[in-house]
Image (cartoon, helix red, strand yellow):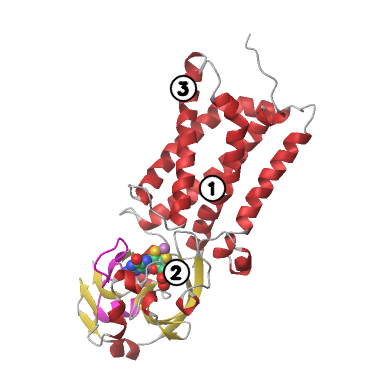
């Protein structure tokens, strides 16, 4: 017989089960919304993302980032509840148990890795030697697999623990309430970075929706991108090239002479903040028609920024043809600030911020 030391009820299986279910559900939501973000940015050749609803990406990425933050208290509570078992001796009993232990040995570091790299990323701090998106994406699959196997292994124990009535439920219930409240506070103090009415509570959010020139945040400034001079460069032209009947070379004046559209669209950054603004400019669709591009054409949007991971993006047909997709010359009633992409920037509905290319110089139709 294994002798068990007397333990606090906070290390028991009931609590571990409840926390496990809450964690499993929230990790699932964060995993799925993370996949949405990944595939929006790396669309497979056979699929194109829809351009509507306008705010869809803003919502999925908000759930991903704010949900990921809300997981931290749950994860810490779960680790605290189960840690006596993590270090128990002997380390495993039998082959099945060895597998379960190996899965937990993968699950715990993978979960911590996701939370820590995610946190660093939204804080715009990159102390690690690897590329964040690649590492975060592949670790997500490892974590999802480990969580699934762990949940299957534990399903009977969890069902049993959740059905049986404990002799004294009060300490557990209080602990769960405290953990839930902590997650709630995390959400309330960060969600304002994407939910404007709660902006005043967003004390822990790395970006606020109204900071920055023209009341809109900036990730990469014109100074950092080396594009400050473009804003006042009279030699600047927009080129529409590639598979078109009539290649175009347009100056600012040419663009202003085309039909102008004004639309309210959000910038929804992958780092979780988002902000709506009123953009004025020319429809990409109109430019493609003017150039005589095919209706199903894909368009590569090229920035005049020389280096940088986000200096180009692709518009699949749904986005290229959407009447809301603009090349904007102005925002919130004024010409674009250099930091927001002057002289011209892309802004399209339901699209990650990293693909709202600034300082545009060329549309290449493919
Ligand atoms: N050329 C270029 N465009 C870019 C970027 C960039 O680094 N280079 N950053 C993108 C990112 S990450 C975001 S969130 C939006 C932010 O737009 P804003 O600075 O106007 O708010 O611009 C996008 N456009
Ligand atoms: Mo972004």
- Which residue corresponds to the image point at 44% horizontal and 59% vertical from the top-left? 270
Q: Which residue is mark 2?
A: 349
**Residue 356 can be seen in this image:** no
Q: Nearer the viewer, mark 1 or mark 2?
A: 1
Is 102 on the left or on the right of 79, as rendered?
Answer: left
Q: Nearer the viewer, mark 3 or mark 2?
A: 3
Task: Specify few, some or many for label 1: CA neighbours under 10 Å numbering under 14, 14-19, or 20 or more.
Answer: some
In what quadrant of the picture does the C terminus appear? bottom left
Between marks 1 and 2, how big is the CA–CA gap?
A: 23 Å
- Which residue corresponds to the image point at 56% horizontal and 20% vertical from the top-left? 88
* Residue 285 or residue 142, whichever sits in front: 142
Task: Specify few, some or many for label 2: CA neighbours under 10 Å numbering under 14, 14-19, or 20 or more.
Answer: many
First to last magenta residue range? 284-313
Q: Which residue is farthest front? A: 127
Picture quadrant of residue 102: top left
Q: Earlier in the sequence, mark 1 or mark 2?
A: 1
Residues at badges 1 and 2 in contact (C-beta under 8 Å)? Answer: no
Is 179 on the left or on the right of 93, as rendered?
Answer: right
Residues at badges 1 and 3 in contact (C-beta under 8 Å)? Answer: no
- Which residue corresponds to the image point at 68% horizontal and 49% vertical from the top-left? 181
Q: Nearer the viewer, mark 1 or mark 3?
A: 3
Identify the element where label 3 is drawn.
helix
Q: Which residue is mark 3?
A: 99
Q: Which residue is mark 1?
A: 29
In what quadrant of the picture does the N terminus appear? top right
Q: Earlier in the sequence, mark 3 or mark 2?
A: 3
Q: Is residue 314 above or below residue 36?
A: below
Task: Kindly tell me whether mark 1's CB lies below 8 Å from ligand 2.
Answer: no
Residues at badges 3 and 2 in contact (C-beta under 8 Å)? Answer: no
Between marks 3 and 2, how big is the CA–CA gap?
A: 46 Å
Between marks 1 and 3, how big is the CA–CA gap?
A: 26 Å
Identify the element where label 2 is drawn.
loop
């Amino acid at each position: 017989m294994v002798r068990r030391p007397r333990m606090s009820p906070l290390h028991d299986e009931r609590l571990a089960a409840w926390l496990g279910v809450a964690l499993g559900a929230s990790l699932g939501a964060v995993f799925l919304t993370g996949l949405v973000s990944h595939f929006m940015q790396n669309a497979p050749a056979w699929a194109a993302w829809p351009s509507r609803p306008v705010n869809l990406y803003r919502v999925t990425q908000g759930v991903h980032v704010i949900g990921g933050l809300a997981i931290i208290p749950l994860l810490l509570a779960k680790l605290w509840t189960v840690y006596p078992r993590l270090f128990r001796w002997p380390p495993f009993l039998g082959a099945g148990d060895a597998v379960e232990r190996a899965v937990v040995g993968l699950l715990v570091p993978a979960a911590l890795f996701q939370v820590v790299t995610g946190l660093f990323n939204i804080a715009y701090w990159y102390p690690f030697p690897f590329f964040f998106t690649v590492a975060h994406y592949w670790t997500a699959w490892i974590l999802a697999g480990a969580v699934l196997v762990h949940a299957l292994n534990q399903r009977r124990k969890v069902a049993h623990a959740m059905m049986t009535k404990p002799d004294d439920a009060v300490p557990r219930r209080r602990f769960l309430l405290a953990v839930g409240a902590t997650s709630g506070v995390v959400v309330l103090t960060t969600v304002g970075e994407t939910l404007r009415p709660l902006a005043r509570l967003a004390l822990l959010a790395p970006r606020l929706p109204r900071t920055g020139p023209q009341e809109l945040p900036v990730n990469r400034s014109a100074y950092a991108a080396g594009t400050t001079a473009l804003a006042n460069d009279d030699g600047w032209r927009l080129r529409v090239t590639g598979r078109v009947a009539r290649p175009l070379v347009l100056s600012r004046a040419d663009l202003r002479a085309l039909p102008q559209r004004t639309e309210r669209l959000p910038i929804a950054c992958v780092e979780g903040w988002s902000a709506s603004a009123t953009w004025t400019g020319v429809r990409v669709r109109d430019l493609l028609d003017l150039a005589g591009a095919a209706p199903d054409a894909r368009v590569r949007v090229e920035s005049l920024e020389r280096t940088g991971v986000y200096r180009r993006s692709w518009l699949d047909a749904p986005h290229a043809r959407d009447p809301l997709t603009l090349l904007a010359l102005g925002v919130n009633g004024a010409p674009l600030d250099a930091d927001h992409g002057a002289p011209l920037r892309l802004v399209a509905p339901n699209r990650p911020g990293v693909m709202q290319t600034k300082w545009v110089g060329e549309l290449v139709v493919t």
